[in-house]
Amino acid sequence: MRVATTSRIAGAEITETLGLVRGSTVRAKHIGTDIVAGLKNLVGGEVRGYSSLMAGAREQALDRMIAQAEALGADAVVAVRFETSQIMGGASEIVAYGTAVRLDAAQ
């Protein structure tokens, strides 16, 4: 599955637009991570626990979006974007979305 943030795939012709596909996940932070984050707030620096949590969430959302595109018979997903929002204190949603397309088979 080709995935691009651009509206087209270089060297390939889009022959059919299949529609919007998306994947999402909601993740909650761990109290231990909050304690480390509080300490980091005093001295500064990256909160690796949160970085890891969000990286995993982005990958899961992307995988779910790709699975939806595959179910439609897509060859690629173009114009891919990520968004995040806070659901409640301590929990965030990550959404990956784009347009599922079919490419010219000769490409």
Image (cartoon, grey):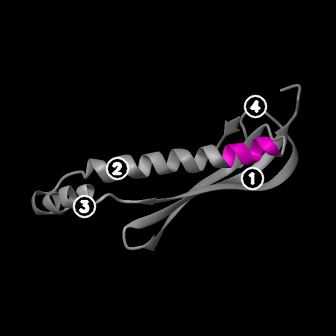
- The numbered mark, 3 or 4, whose residue comes first in the sequence reads 4
Please say whether residue 6 is visible from this viewpoint: no
Q: Which residue is mark 3?
A: 34
* Residue depicted at x 75% and y 40%: 76
The amino acid type found where label 2 is placed reads Ser
Marks 3,4: beta carbons within 8 A: no
Alpha-carbon span between mark 4 and mark 1: 18 Å
* Residue depicted at x 75% and y 31%: 11
- Residue 30 in the image, given as x and y percentages of width and height: 32, 57
Q: Furthest-bottom residue in view?
A: 88
Residue 51's label in the rendered image is 2
- Residue 4 in the image, given as x and y percentages of width and height: 65, 43
| Label total for image | 4
Judging depth in this view, the residue of 26 and 51 nearest the camera is 26
Residue 99's label in the rendered image is 1
Marks 2,3: beta carbons within 8 A: no
Please say whether residue 65 is visible from this viewpoint: yes
Q: Is residue 102 above or below residue 41?
A: above
Q: Which residue is mark 4?
A: 11
- The numbered mark, 2 or 4, whose residue comes first in the sequence reads 4
Quadrant the N terminus occupies: top right
Alpha-carbon span between mark 3 and mark 4: 46 Å
Label 2 residue SS? helix
Location of residue 101 by image quarter: top right
Label 4 residue SS? loop
- Residue 34 in the image, given as x and y percentages of width and height: 24, 61
Horizontally, residue 56 falls left or right of residue 89, namely right
